[in-house]
């Protein structure tokens, strides 16, 4: 790999190997290919600047071609990841931040994280179950304890209304909502 710069064919093969193993976005795949090019440049005694520019251009072309073929779909990635993170009890804000870190456009992220208040409540309850707060706490708590639990949900990204509903939810209903969320 150190002798010649990665050409479009080698980058295409590397991209196919990556998407066969990992779900990714256009930006994520481009980062993977650029890291491959950077490794070549570091290993070469004197990397050719023109070859480096050509390799970066080829990486962008490979990503665009795979996206045009449907092998990479940011919207499908965002929808799948949003469902998974919702079942794990993540808030819309946390999901949007995760998607942004993966290179998903803001509009695509908004479409993937659009959900109703019932789903938000179920996600908040899943988070509360993991943290053993609200209806899942083993003992009763006082006003100061409730305020702290409200802070836990707020820091997780849940709005005040959803957090208050989650903390006030009866244990049986809370468990049923969490189970329903996991099944969706």
Image (spheres, helix red, strand yellow):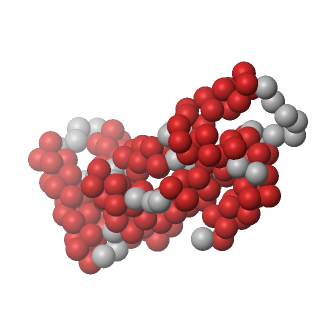
Report if residue 33 is visible in the image.
Answer: no
Provide residue 177's location: percent of width, then percent of height: 68, 61
Which corner quadrant of the image does residue 173 belong to? Answer: bottom right
Q: Residue furthest top?
A: 144
Residue 55 drawn at (x, y percent): 21, 54
Q: Is 95 positioned to the left or the right of 168 in the image?
A: left
Residue at screen point 40% across, 59% down? 114
**Residue located 67% across and 67% down the image:** 180
- The answer to whether 133 appears left or right of 30 in the picture is right
Residue occupying the point 72% across, 21% down? 144
Judging depth in this view, the residue of 30 and 151 nearest the camera is 151
Q: Position of residue 73 (x, y in %)?
A: 33, 68
Q: Where, quadrant-wise, is the C terminus in this rendering?
A: bottom right
Q: Is residue 3 above or below residue 69?
A: above
Q: Position of residue 103 (x, y in %)?
A: 33, 50
In the rendered image, the quadrant that contains the N terminus is bottom left
Q: Pick out the residue farthest to the left.
A: 50
In this view, the residue farthest toward the bottom is: 69
Left of 76 or right of it: where is 80?
Answer: right
Q: Quadrant of residue 79?
A: bottom left
Res 96 seen here: yes
Front residue of 35/87: it is 87
Image vertical order of residue 176 relative to residue 128, above or below: below
Q: Nearer the viewer, residue 108 or 33?
A: 108
Q: Residue at x 85, y 34 (%)?
A: 140
Image position of 115 with respect to 71: above or below: above
Answer left or right for 116 relative to 35.
Answer: right
């Amino acid at each position: 790999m150190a002798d010649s710069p990665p050409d479009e064919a080698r980058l295409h093969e590397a991209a196919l190997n990556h998407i066969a193993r990992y779900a990714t976005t256009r930006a994520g795949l481009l980062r993977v290919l650029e890291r491959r090019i950077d490794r070549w440049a570091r290993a070469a005694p004197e990397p050719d600047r023109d070859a480096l520019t050509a390799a970066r251009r080829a990486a962008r072309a490979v990503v665009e071609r795979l996206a045009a073929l449907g092998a990479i779909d940011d919207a499908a990635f965002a929808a799948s990841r949003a469902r998974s993170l919702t079942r794990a009890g993540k808030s819309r804000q946390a999901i949007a931040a995760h998607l942004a870190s993966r290179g998903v456009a803001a509009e695509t992220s908004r479409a993937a994280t659009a959900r109703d208040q019932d789903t938000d409540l179920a996600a908040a309850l899943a988070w509360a179950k993991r943290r053993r707060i609200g209806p899942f706490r083993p003992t009763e708590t006082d006003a100061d304890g409730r305020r702290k639990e409200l802070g836990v949900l707020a820091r997780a990204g849940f709005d005040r209304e959803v957090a208050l509903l989650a903390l006030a939810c009866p244990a049986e209903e809370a468990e049923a909502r969490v189970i329903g969320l996991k099944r969706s």
